[in-house]
Image (tube, rainbow, N blue to C red):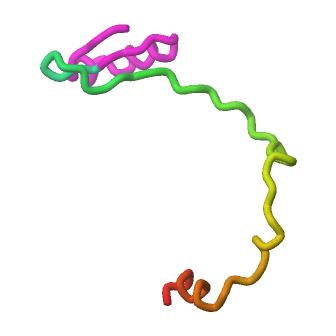
Amino acid sequence: MATVNVHEAKTHLSRLLAQVEAGEEVTIARNGKPVARLVPCKKRGKRQFGAMKGKIKVDDSFFDPLPEEELRLWEGG
């Protein structure tokens, strides 16, 4: 893991991002003290419609009308 100071990070950001894309971690320090870390983003899997089917149960009462008082509160009254 490389450590660079803020000035070097600002000057060579593109190079540092290339290192991160290659899997490295880069620590950015101010006055020799670490303040931030550049790490590769986790790749997200493709979302699939219906992936949660059968894993979540919504009770039928969820669709019941709200009581008047609660409805007023939701509407800012």
Q: Quadrant of residue 58?
A: bottom right
Residue at coordinates 75% horizontally, 40% vertically from top-left? 47
Q: Residue at x 34, y 21 (%)?
A: 13
Q: Quadrant of residue 68?
A: bottom right
- Looking at the image, the residue that sits furthest to the left is 31
The x and y percentages for residue 49 are 82, 46
List x then y, in percent, for residue 42: 57, 26
Total numbered labels placed on residues in the image = 0
Quick one: 75 or 70, which is closer to the camera?
70
Q: Is residue 61 above or below residue 31?
A: below
Which residue: 82% across, 42% down?
51
Left or right of 72 in this view: 13: left
Residue 48 left/right relative to 70: right
Magenta-drawn stretch contains 18: yes
**Residue 16 x %, y %:** 38, 16
Q: Nearer the viewer, residue 31 or 58?
A: 58
Q: Which residues are magenta?
A: 1-27
What residue do we see at 81% from left, 46% from top? 55
Q: Is residue 7 left or right of residue 16?
A: left
Depth check, front residue: 34 or 46: 34
Given the current orientation, which residue lies at the most extreme top position? 1
The answer to which quarter of the image holds residue 4 is: top left
Which quadrant: the N terminus?
Answer: top left
Residue 36 coordinates in the image, percent (x, y): 31, 26
Q: Is residue 54 above or below residue 17?
A: below
Residue 69 on the magenta span: no
In the rendered view, does 19 fall on the left or right side of 55? left
